[in-house]
Amino acid sequence: MTDPIVAETDVYITRSFAAPRSVVWKFWTEPAQIVTWFGPGDFTVPIESVEIDLRVGGAWNLTMTDGTMSSPIVGTIVELVEEELLVVRLDAPESGVGALTDLTLRVQFHDHGDRTRITLHQGPFTAEARDMTAEGWEFSFVTIDSLLEGAKA
């Protein structure tokens, strides 16, 4: 599997997590896991807003909220290889920088034994939306690290 060319309008992040690929995969594909980490800052994801139908053509939907603003993300899974690849076509009609439409989120999961490296590629964005999205992912990934660390304690 090769990743498409990364443009200046895209977010591209490679990140390693201290957990096997099967565990990291669940963070992206199980509603009870997504609500524990997804979203930047004060945003949360109510479990009732998450809909994941794990198949090509299936839904990958959720809503982030900070109590005053809600930001739904509506997605359709376009590629899926269990524990290896998740590709979702997304729309976020009410983001902090206006409507974001026709985005592609591509997450590859690489097995490194007791660690997993993900490669996330998402876009296209405006420069402002790209930077905001990259910051959100970084915040969320720190949350995953904390959850994994807590699971070891």
Image (spheres, helix red, strand yellow):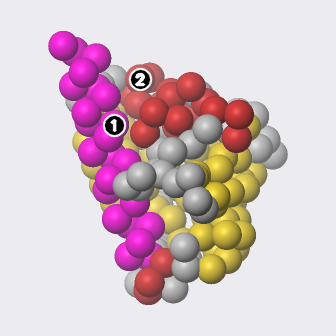
**Residue ID for mark 2:** 23
Element type where label 1 sits in the image: helix
State yes or no: residue 149 in magenta: yes
**Residue ID for mark 1:** 144
- Residue 20 vs residue 106: left or right? left
Image location of residue 138, percent across then percent down: 32, 56
- Residue 142 vs residue 73: left or right? left
Q: Point out the residue furthest to the front here.
A: 68
**Residue 135 against residue 31 in the figure, above or below:** below
Image location of residue 118, percent across then percent down: 37, 45
Q: Earlier in the sequence, mark 2 or mark 1?
A: 2
Q: Residues within 10 Å of mark 2 (few under 14, many from 20)?
A: some
**Residue 143 against residue 149 in the figure, above or below:** below
Q: Point out the residue furthest to the right here.
A: 57
Can residue 115 be seen in this snapshot?
A: no
* Magenta span main SS: helix
Q: Residues within 10 Å of mark 1 (few under 14, many from 20)?
A: many
Q: Residue at x 33, y 37 (%)?
A: 144
Which amino acid, mark 2?
A: Val
On the rendered image, what quadrant is the C terminus found in? top left
Can residue 141 be seen in this snapshot?
A: yes
Q: Nearer the viewer, residue 69 or 88?
A: 69
